[in-house]
Image: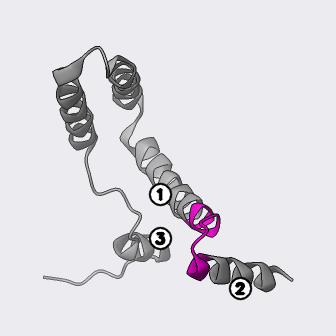
Amino acid sequence: MEKTKLDREEFWNTVDPDKLNLSKSDILNFCQSCIDEWKENKISNFRYILAMSIMQAQIKITPEIVLKKIWKKIILWFYDLTFQNALHNDDPMMKELKRLHEGKKD
């Protein structure tokens, strides 16, 4: 078997932890499992069922390559939001982290 050299983008895709490895049908199945769980209490969960159904429709019409690009951006935003949320925690350790983070900006 002949080894082929990966170009720069191919290499980074192989080590990218934010790369979407799920297929479109995997994501749709996950959405459906959420809906099935929420259907156990349809009245209380109606808005979640509706929102996830709309999300399923959007996923179905989105090309897989676009879905993968969007997924990567969502993951990056999620990391940033999680960090920003932690900085607003009143825990003394998080206050110290916030102080260090704000000092880094100067």
Q: Position of residue 25 (x, y in %)?
A: 22, 38
Residue that carries the numbered disc 1 in the rendered image: 75
Residue at disc 2, secondary structure: helix
Circle 1: residue type: Ile
Residue 13 sits above or below residue 30 on the image: below
The quarter of the picture where residue 29 lies is top left
Colouring scheme, one of rainbow, by chain, secondary structure, one colour: one colour
Residue at disc 1, secondary structure: helix
Circle 3: residue type: Glu
Residue that carries the numbered disc 3 in the rendered image: 9
Q: 97 or 1, which is in the foreground? A: 97
The quarter of the picture where residue 87 lies is bottom right
Label 1 and label 3: CA atoms lie apart by 19 Å
Q: Main secondary structure of the magenta part?
A: helix
Indicate yes or no whether the magenta region holds residue 48.
no
Q: Position of residue 15 (x, y in %)?
A: 37, 76
- Per the rendered image, the range of residues in magenta is 83-94
Q: Earlier in the sequence, mark 3 or mark 2?
A: 3
Label 1 and label 2: CA atoms lie apart by 24 Å
Q: Position of residue 18 (x, y in %)?
A: 41, 64
In the rendered structure, are the residues bearing label 1 and label 3 in contact, judged by CB atoms less than 8 Å apart? no
Indicate yes or no whether the magenta region holds residue 89.
yes
Q: 30 or 102, which is in the foreground? A: 102
